[in-house]
Image: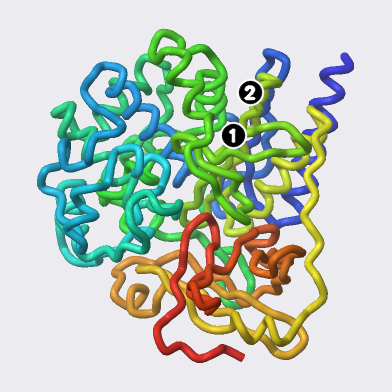
Amino acid sequence: MQEQEKHGDFGAVVAALAEEYGVPGASVGILAGGQTIFLNHGVTSLAHPLPVDENTLFHLGSTTKTFTATALLRLVEEGKVDLAAPVRRYVPELVLADEAAAERITVLNLLNHTAGLDWNFIDSEDEDGSLAAFVAKLDRLPLIAPPGARASYSQAGYNLLGRIIENVTGQTYEQAVASLLLEPLGLANTVFGLDDVMVRKFAVGYVRDEAGELKPARPWKAYRAGARGDNPGGGIVSNVADLLAWARFHLSDGDGLLAADTLHGMREQTVELRGSTLGDGFGICWFLRGVDGVRTIGHGGSGNGQFAELHLVPEHDFAVASLANSEDGYVFNQAVIRAAFEHYLGLVEKDPEPVPHDETRAREVAGRYESDVMNIDIATDGQRLTLAVEIKPEIRAASDTEMPPDYAPAAMGFLPGDGDEYLLTEGGLKGQRGYFTRAADGAVTGVDLGGRLFTRATGAQPVS
């Protein structure tokens, strides 16, 4: 009875957070003490409402990467892939902007985001949307660091891993993941194609219009809904029931699919992350993060008006998954994860306090920073520093589909220490941490946000 009351109490927490952040529908799953608990709230659609339950499908976005990495490790155990081998052994057609980098990048560099590839590119040209077509255009993608020099989160790197899987297995990426993982684990409601989504119960994503009103997000998946070239980095659709089954597998000793040492090795740090909300380092795919002295692993994902989070605490055999169907789902999910850690495990996570505004430091970092797809504008008005994120206007204008909204300017503050780490204190990315990169002469050359590097635009003047 006491356990039932505990879960009921947390159901009230989920409902209150959904109301606070204006999330129409949310599905939360808890794996604790050998029990699986589902706590659902709201509706799948405002126009055609059905109650959200643990079988409701959501787009998982980048949480897909945990499936891609695990499938790749099955091929490693079968002797078909070597983590230390150059990617070109398996994708001989690979051409990058830097030939030396193309020769040096290893499979492990892709898995732990140290390949030096920029985040991704969005191509609106008419093409077949396949992984082969995606890889054929990677020579257009900027390289932001030499292979192995640093971690910078790359969607393109995981899509390239998908091409390794295709070339090694002789199957499509989707077929290979199904046969390597989804079918043996019984994840019958974890799918890629919209045709498979439409015959199941699914959530409609929502974004806010200029008046702040929720409207359905189109396309249902982010960007080009039918393009398979982005599936390894972010194409899976699933529900919280399957997601907790996936977590249970990763907390197991491999269930006969992977050796325990291989599976548990995904949790071991391979590279450090600095000043990131996402974690202290990467294992193989997983973000590694200490919470109140306890090691956790996790991964999140974003789609078009849909957000997902999955976090595991191996030493407590605990997992929490949270899925939400609005652009405010990111902050909702973060709040759910924190609340679950505290409610079930007594682990309390607190954001550090920013130091008072320093206009000299603010002017030093103010300006435009960019990746291949997005711009970050940092500005100061003399009283506070703000950060805004936008999809590049030329990319948005060239798209034949509606794209996710930009993030309006939100307050940020420097954190104690060397002065280069910061925290966002409001807005849709509230709680995100990052840091500024400097050249040898001390000049600010880039900013990290969401685990990825944005380079200071050449000749950019401070934005104020």
Asked if the residue under mark 1 is in contact with the one under mark 2, i.e. CB atoms within 8 Å, the reply is yes
Q: Which label was assigned to residue 119?
A: none
227, 165: nearer the viewer: 165
Give the vertical position of 375 relative to 127 (above or below). Answer: below
| Residue at image location 36% in from the left, 63% down from the top | 144
User: How many residues crowd mark 2 within 10 Å: few (<14), some (14–19), many (20+)?
Assistant: some
Q: Mark 1 or mark 2, which is nearer the start of the sequence?
A: 1
> What residue is disc 1 on?
297
> What residue is disc 2 on?
314
Cα distance between the residues tagged 2 and 1: 8 Å
Question: Where residue 190 appears, x then y in whole percent?
Answer: 41, 30
Q: Locate the N terminus by quadrant.
A: top right
Q: Is residue 92 visible?
A: yes
Q: Name the amino acid, label 2.
A: Pro
Give the vertical position of 61 relative to 77 (above or below). Answer: below
User: How many residues crowd mark 1 within 10 Å: few (<14), some (14–19), many (20+)?
Assistant: many
Q: Locate the C terminus by quadrant.
A: bottom right
